Amino acid sequence: MVVSDAIGSEARFDAVLVGAGIMSSTLALLLHELEPEMRILIIERLGAPALESSAAINNSGTGHAANCEFNYTPLKPDGSLEISQALAINSAFERSLELWASLTELGKISPASFLHSLPHMSFVSSETNIALLRQRYMNLSVRNAFQDMEWSEDEEEIKEWMPLIMNARDSGQKVAATRVARGTDIDFGALTIAYLNELQLSGAVELRLSTEVISISRSNDKSWRLSLAGTKGEYFVETPFVFLGAGGGALSLLQKSGIPESKSYGGFPVSGQWLVCNDPSLTKMHNAKVYGKSAVGAPPMSVPHLDTRWIKGKRSLLFGPFAGFNTKFLKNGSRFDFFRTIKLSNAFPMIQAGFKNFDLINYLLGQLQLDHSARMNALKEFFPQANSDDWTLSIAGQRVQIIKMTKDGGMLKLGTEVVASSDGSLAALLGASPGASTAVSIMLEVLQSCWLEKMSTDIWQKRLKKLLPSFGKDLISDESLLDQLRHRSDSLLGLR
């Protein structure tokens, strides 16, 4: 990979993207495809791209399509199931597959380097959770997006689906599972590298590593002036557009920009941990991502799952996540990160959000007290024969949940959110899951917010539809279009 560290007293770019992860690389790719002459600079504070949230070991690797995750189908107060989020996430993931299929067709990426076909399953064992899973299955399977979802309460059939989980389980214990064969495991770090390699070949995109943003301010002509510190000292660049896609670091950078929209936000950091097994005799027995149901009162982020993963080409098993807490906003950050983002404008909303989320605080306190034995006991709920010697603890990525001031006071938001200045000259992405899986849809939102005039031109529309043939159409309501899109994506990406 070619990396530039060129220093000039002043340099001007058409767009500066902060953070060399899946979000910035996706936006850079879209901008380059839409405007090949655009000069784009990507800045990364670490010595290589995709080392933070996008790195394979730092996330679940699930191609989130709401196939198996209970938190995307919450219960309403009346006992019915809310499925709108599941439909939206499924549609957004199809958009990602659509782009990857187009880039594969154009010879710009190879899906084998980052994508594996892998069934997605939900698994439960109590009467209450079986009833909930059945309700989820009944609500989703009638929709075209989930028509291939399978249901089973048959012990032998479920054993065929997930032998590692069912072996040595008490015979006669009531269990239930759903399966969607068309699931995926994705190495978002490898995908980021594939994007950046392709972009740098064009000569229009420059990547500067070991470079940190010191300040962001308006220049006299309404452009943004960024003070950067690199390996050769401090210098400035100017640009009419800035994107802050720096994972947990995006909030502090957004605050540095001083835009009014930044004053409504705070952040709450949560770290993650996985139990990892690399024993080939076990990894070959499990070929799925299997999600369970979180405990009563636990937050959505605590959903336990046992996953097959491919990390740097090596097959592993991961179980978790187990949460931790420290005040860093990035895995490679500072313990002062959290405190530096507390301002007069967001302190009260953050306190309000704390009072409203005692369940999260209690959950984190409990997680902090877990030792290896306790984590193994949680794993044995999934895999009764798990041997402690086969599993080691791995530290995952750091996530910063959004705290936002709303009409109802400070609220903790567990999704992702694009924050843009009123003039569209600066945008930031805050929040966590299901970010990476839906990066294409999120970056299209950035383009609609910040490049609206260009997005309405015939040339951009034509180029977008070359990359995304279904662009502008509703995949949720148009069943025929979804079927056509899936057939195309599956064929080009080698799924199923």
Image (tube, rainbow, N blue to C red):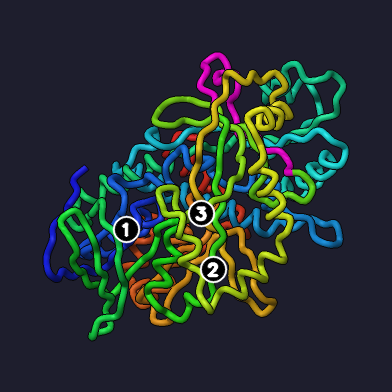
Q: How far apart are marks 3 and 1 (CA)?
A: 16 Å
Residue 44 image offset from top left, x and y in percent: 30, 54
Left or right of residue 373: residue 462: left
Q: Is residue 240 magenta?
A: no
Type of the residue with mark 2: Gly
Q: In this view, does 447 lie above or below 173?
A: below
Residue depicted at 59% across the width and 67% down the height: 403
Three-letter residue code for mark 3: Gly
Q: Mark 1 points at which residue?
A: 28
Q: Earlier in the sequence, mark 3 or mark 1?
A: 1
Residue that carries the numbered disc 2 in the rendered image? 266
Q: How far apart are marks 1 and 2 (CA)?
A: 27 Å
Q: Name the residue under label 3.
A: 435
Q: Nearer the viewer, residue 9 or 421?
A: 9
Residue 263 visible? The answer is: yes
The answer to which image quadrant residue 302 occupies is: top right
Secondary structure of the residue carrying numbered label 3: helix
- Work out which quarter of the rendered image holds the N terminus and state it: top left
Looking at the rendering, the stretch of residues picked out in magenta corresponds to 276-294
